[in-house]
Amino acid sequence: MAEPGERAEPGERAGPGSYEGVELPPLLTVQESVLATDVSLLEVVTLAGVIPCVRHGGLGDGEVGAAIFLGGALGGLSGPAAGLYQRVAERTGGIRLHYRRPGDLDACVADVVLLADLLLQRGCRRVVTVGHSFGGAVAVGAGVALGERCAGVVTLATQAPGCERVDELRAPILIVHGEEDAILPDLASRLVHQLAGGPKELLLLPGEGHLLSGVADLLDERVGAFVLGALGMAA
């Protein structure tokens, strides 16, 4: 892999292994610039577009693991519950990713797998994927593709389409949904939980809608604890 700021060979796809069913976009370069203490802008530049990310804590450079946080069908970096992703990423370390082509499931899964591959090449051992709404299906799809390199998956108010292979996950999954979700009913998460074959937990939240706005503190704790536990890191 090219170091930050250096040019990779077009089409370069070195890595710890292949990813069945995922076509990674050819990598051109990786640019990283510091925004603040322990926060940087990471731009993964490919022939098919740029994957912009916000990185917290420097994980992926010899550390035990990292979490990748994924938005919904329109992308974004904040997540539900009034900025859950920033808060959990600051606590656990990790990367908030915005897709090249929001809403395109295959392309979004490829973005996540490519970023995970870059982290693994830098010495990161395993990753956790966390996704909201459409991003829940992306998190599951990437987790399946990564195989044993995935330490865990979190879905938040996920859709069911795109999660059909959840039974192939080799990692635990935490499935969260509001019982008053008017956009994606909690039946979607119930179905995903039913299909999941490995260690799994379904957390249904009474009175909560799609954005899970009333349970920010609870999600900070539960998602943060799941990420740290999956990666074997101290709280």
Image (cartoon, grey):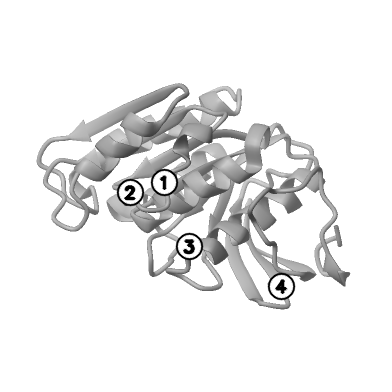
- Tell me the crowding category of disc 4: few under 14, some 14 to 19, or many 20 or more residues within 10 angstroms, Cα based: many
- Tell me the crowding category of disc 2: few under 14, some 14 to 19, or many 20 or more residues within 10 angstroms, Cα based: many
Q: Which residue is mark 3?
A: 105
- Tell me the crowding category of disc 3: few under 14, some 14 to 19, or many 20 or more residues within 10 angstroms, Cα based: some
Q: Are circles 3 and 1 on residues that touch, CB within 8 Å?
A: no
- Identity, as a three-letter code, of the amino acid under mark 4: Val
Q: Which residue is mark 1?
A: 163
Q: Secondary structure at mark 4?
A: strand
First in sequence, mark 3 or 1: give its number: 3
Residue 108 percent across, percent down from the top left: 53, 62
Report how far apart the C-alphas of labels 1 and 2 lie in the structure. 5 Å
Q: Is residue 56 above or below residue 124?
A: below
Say which of marks 4 and 3 sits in front. Answer: 3
Horizontal side of residue 89 vs 184, given as left or right: right
Q: Which mark is residue 45?
A: 4
Q: Secondary structure at mark 2?
A: loop
Q: Secondary structure at mark 3?
A: helix
